[in-house]
Amino acid sequence: MKFFIDTANLDQIKEAQDLGVLDGVTTNPSLMAKEGISGAENIINHYKKICDIVEGDVSAEVISTDFEGMIKEGEELAALHPQIVVKIPMIKEGIKAIKYLTGKGIRTNCTLVFSVGQALLAAKAGATYVSPFIGRLDDISTDGVELIAQIVEMYNYYGFETEVLAASIRHTMHIIQCMDAGADVSTCPLNAILGLLNHPLTDIGLEKFLADYKKVNG
Ligand code: E4P
């Protein structure tokens, strides 16, 4: 399973990259706004900075909602850097845009996916990634991880190549559950990734190893 970090914060992206296990980054307009990044030029420069830090795919989201606007933005974003994957919302015009951009050899990430039917459309349009938002489903008492499992099963059954990118991950256990469900990628906040490191027996074991070493070595 690939790990993407779900942030536009450069320090957090660097910290995850330094771990050596990062496969990419996802951003969205809310995450860019959270970092205070505004204006076309600043946004473009920020995407370039992210691409300079990581080696993998970097999702950059369009803000247009009409076909012409999405493909124009998509082509501009894709031209910025070979690592850019164009993030397109799961709406009717978005599906047309994914189909068009795929035909032009531009990779896409279909975002705001909340049902298996939407995931089917994204795959048929040729999306590189589909992003089901599991945390937002959990927020409304619906099982987000179960949706990941359904999409993985459906894609495997029909042989779709679209990768299932579990998004809206809120905590470490979500990562484990998405791994169990067969997600190809989890895009996570830094804390959720770092949470995978933790086990009390690791801490106790290390403390004892070091104490035993000190006993005989001073
Ligand atoms: C990533 O691609 C999504 O935009 C992101 O995971 C959404 O997460 P949220 O539901 O925590 O805002």
Image (cartoon, helix red, strand yellow):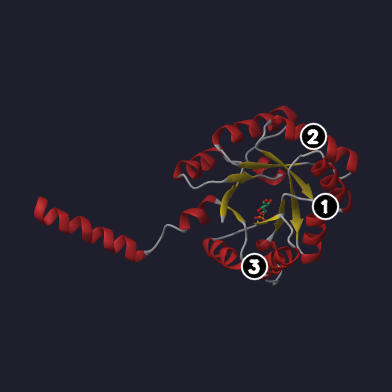
Percent coordinates x, y for residue 73 in the rendering: 80, 36
Residue 53's disc is: none
The nearer-to-camera label among 3 and 1 is: 1
Tell me the quarter of the image containing the N terminus: bottom right
Q: Position of residue 44 (x, y in %)?
A: 70, 31
Residue located at (73% from left, 35% from top) = 78
Per the image, the residue denoted by label 3 is 145
In screen coordinates, is 158 left or right of 21?
Answer: right
Q: Helix, strand, or loop for circle 3? A: helix
Work out whether residue 203 or residue 146 is closer to the camera in this orientation and state it. Answer: 146
Measuring 88% from the left and 53% from the top, which residue is drawn there?
A: 92
Q: Amino acid at mark 2?
A: Glu
Q: Nearer the viewer, mark 3 or mark 2?
A: 2
Pointer 2: residues within 10 angstroms few (<14), some, or many (20+)?
some
Q: Are marks 3 and 2 in contact (CB under 8 Å)?
A: no
The residue located at (57%, 32%) in the rendering is 52
Reading the image, the residue beneath label 2 is 75
Q: Nearer the viewer, residue 7 or 81?
A: 81
Q: Residue at x 72, y 27 (%)?
A: 41
Q: Earlier in the sequence, mark 3 or mark 1?
A: 1
Q: Picture quarter containing residue 215?
A: bottom left
- Residue position marked by numbered label 1 in the rendering: 125
**Callout 1 amino acid:** Ala
